[in-house]
């Protein structure tokens, strides 16, 4: 009944509500959330010149709040419930003068707060620190951006002994978090909220255990909220590992093999890794010395888990007003109305928001490890 309202906050360090000249100039807002890597946003402002104050230049261009590295917080209000869609910084500014009076536009492009972790390349040492401890240390050094760490330890803890070795990484802090996460099929992302100025920094496996969101409905009459959707099955994605490793502790050559995905809970009734046998790709571990057999198994399992995450992909668009909410990425959602093979639960890999006056669309990408619904119904 109250509709949808968008709130814009800007500031060099502590964002405040946008000034009237900026708020009135907003034409459209686009936001994209991904479960891996940085998320981004784009704000299109209408720019004009009127009066003696604009003789020298467009007044909005002189506003320091639209310059690169200004912090931006975008919040959408559905009814009476606010949800933070983006907390990031402006990284790019594009100005188009236009050929008609009032037709000039200023486009502000930016990325989430994790872009601040990708500015400085360095060589870092982490004595006596496992991968999870390294992730905690890196995230903790960015507390000024409201990062709250959520670090899930991997199945095998690689605790280095200082007299034997010291982990050393070269690159940005964001590079390090991605590199150590890829060993186990882990992801790293920064999720804005739940309050403006706060951000959840997550390092761990894709989150599949949350309560499913409201269902995406396809071809179910007045309950339909999905405008279009298509499904893709990638038969070349499932991968198992069959290799040998020289155990660091015993110095013996031991086999390392994987057979199934350990992602929990399962989302598909017919996982590809089971129903495609024996037509499944086989891979080897990356050449690496100094691993125990447990560490090698953890990395091999990470390869298999990662490979089946996107066997089935669903891409589509929904009307946010008919959906009556915000589809959250990095979580689970139910889909109904597409038939048993495609219905059921999916992991929400990415969501793109397109907001303008009178319109709010959400484009989504869903993934899972196979086909078939595990449950007879989903949350409507």
Image (tube, helix red, strand yellow):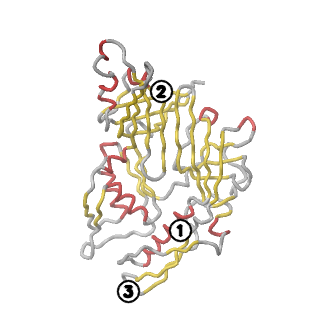
Query: In the picture provided, is 264 more to the left or to the right than 270?
Result: left
Q: Mark 2, residues whose alpha carbon is within 10 Å: few (<14), some, or many (≥20)?
A: some
Query: In the picture provided, is 65 more to the left or to the right than 305?
Result: left
Q: Position of residue 50 (x, y in %)?
A: 36, 14
Q: Position of residue 72 (x, y in %)?
A: 38, 35
Mark 1 or mark 3: which is in front? 1
- The residue located at (55%, 72%) in the rendering is 240
Q: Mark 1, residues whose alpha carbon is within 10 Å: few (<14), some, or many (≥20)?
A: many
Q: Is residue 147 above or below residue 260?
A: above
Q: CA distance from mark 2 to mark 1?
A: 44 Å
Res 296 quadrant in image: bottom left
Q: Are marks 3 and 2 in contact (CB under 8 Å)?
A: no
Q: Quadrant of the N terminus?
A: top right
Q: CA distance from mark 3 to mark 2?
A: 65 Å
Compare marks 2 and 1 and give the one earlier in the sequence: 2
Q: Which residue is mark 2?
A: 27
Q: Which residue is mark 1?
A: 304
Q: Is residue 117 above or below residue 178?
A: above
Question: Could you say whether the residue bearing mark 2 is in a helix, strand or loop?
Answer: strand
The residue nearer to you, when weighing 103 against 203, is: 103
Q: Are marks 1 and 3 in contact (CB under 8 Å)?
A: no
The residue nearer to you, when weighing 30 against 244, is: 30
- The residue located at (65%, 73%) in the rendering is 277
Give the number of the disc on residue 251.
3
């Amino acid at each position: 009944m109250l509709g949808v309202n968008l709130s814009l906050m800007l500031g060099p360090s502590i964002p405040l509500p946008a000034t009237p000249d900026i708020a009135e100039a907003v034409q459209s807002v686009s936001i994209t959330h991904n479960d891996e890597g940085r998320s981004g946003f784009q704000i299109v402002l209408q720019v004009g010149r009127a009066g003696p104050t604009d003789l020298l230049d467009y007044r909005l261009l002189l506003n320091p709040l639209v310059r690169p590295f200004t912090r931006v917080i975008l919040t959408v209000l559905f009814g009476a419930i606010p949800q933070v869609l983006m907390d990031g910084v402006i990284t790019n500014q594009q100005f188009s003068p236009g050929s008609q009076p009032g037709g000039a536009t200023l486009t502000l492009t930016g990325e989430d707060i994790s872009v601040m972790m990708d500015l400085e390349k360095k060589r870092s040492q982490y004595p006596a620190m496992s991968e999870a401890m390294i992730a905690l240390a890196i995230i903790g050094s960015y507390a000024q951006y409201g990062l709250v760490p959520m670090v899930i330890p991997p199945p095998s803890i690689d605790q280095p002994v200082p007299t034997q070795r010291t982990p050393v990484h070269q690159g940005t802090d964001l590079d390090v978090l991605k590199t150590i996460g890829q060993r186990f099929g882990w992801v790293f992302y920064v999720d804005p909220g739940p309050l403006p100025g706060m951000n959840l920094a997550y390092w761990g496996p894709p989150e599949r255990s949350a309560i499913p969101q409201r269902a995406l409905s396809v071809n179910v009459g007045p309950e339909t909220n999905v405008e279009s959707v298509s499904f893709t099955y990638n038969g070349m994605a499932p991968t198992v590992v069959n290799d040998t490793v020289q155990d660091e502790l015993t110095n013996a050559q031991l086999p390392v093999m994987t057979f199934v995905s350990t992602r929990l809970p399962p989302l598909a009734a017919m996982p590809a890794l089971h129903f495609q046998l024996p037509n499944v790709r086989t891979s080897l571990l990356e050449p690496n010395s100094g691993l125990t057999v447990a560490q090698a198994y953890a990395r091999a399992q990470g390869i298999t888990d990662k490979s089946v995450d996107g066997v089935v992909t669903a891409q589509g668009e929904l009307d946010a007003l008919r959906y009556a909410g915000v589809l959250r990425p990095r979580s689970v959602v139910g889909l109904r109305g597409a038939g048993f093979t495609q219905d059921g639960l999916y992991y929400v890999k990415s969501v793109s928001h397109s907001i303008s006056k009178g319109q709010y669309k959400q484009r989504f990408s869903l993934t899972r490890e196979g086909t078939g619904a595990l449950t007879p119904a989903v949350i409507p």
